Amino acid sequence: MQRSDDRFRHACELVRNGLIGEIKEVFVWEHGFSGWRSYAEFGGGGQSDWGAHHYDIAQWGLGMDEYGPVEVIPPILSKADPKPLTYRYASGIVMYRAGKEPNAGVTFVGTNGWVAVNRGFLKCSRPSLETYAFKPSDIRLYKSANHMQNWLECIKTRGPVICSAETGHRTATVCQIGTIAETIGRPLKWDPVAERFDDEAANRMLRREMRAPWAV
């Protein structure tokens, strides 16, 4: 639903048009909730809760709606040198499950500045970018002013929705491979095309045995 918010779209268009230079890092900060979300069988914790919202924006800004990271590295909890959950993309971009700019859910860091965004919040290293007027020749992203209305209109027109099932799948995948890496406790290579790890123990966690006669 954040894709139907002007601030998130503006931030991603700044990134897509190179207005903060070549993207090097992305910081995704999600604050989880307690309760049912903490049960792995049907929750997944903050990583699959707020993470689903913010990783979705990170993927949108990076143009990764039909792809994803190629490596995921679990956090290191050492007091001497702690490191957050880390993803790497084939392009070399690194994404951290960590905060960067206060109040931001997603912060894109490029060679020529940064842009930070959240619900009700947009901040850039150069304030002029916050109200930047895009040119007709610039890359523009799908515009939806109301997420529910977009859904209803597309049912009527049979047009593409702002966030397709494939896009939702790719966002959920980012969340889940991070959770699997944390559980396994070692770095994992991920093939976004085959949707498989380089680790059979991790691959076994991609699905559960289903009760007959159900199958997917």
Image (spheres, rainbow, N blue to C red):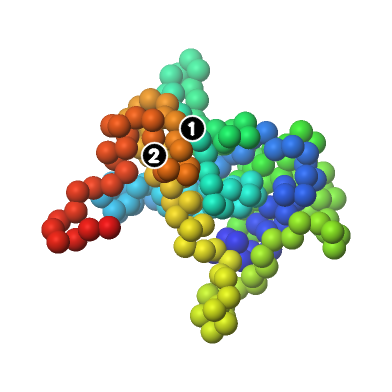
Viewer-closest of 147 and 118: 147
Residue under the image location 27 percent in, 58 percent down = 216
Task: Name the mark on residue 206.
Answer: none
Q: What residue type is labelled 1?
A: Glu
Res 100 → quadrant: top right
- In the rendered image, the residue lying farthest to the left is 212
Check disc 2 and report the residue beneath it: 196
Placement of 185 over or under 13, stated as above or below: above
Q: How many marks?
A: 2
Q: Which amino acid does label 2 sit on?
A: Arg
Task: Name the mark on residue 71.
Answer: 1
Viewer-closest of 161 and 84: 161
Judge the density around disc 1: few (<14), some (14-19), many (≥20) Cα neighbours within 10 Å: many
Q: Is residue 104 visible?
A: no
- In the rendered image, the residue lying farthest to the bottom is 156
Tell whether 145 sits left or right of 180.
right
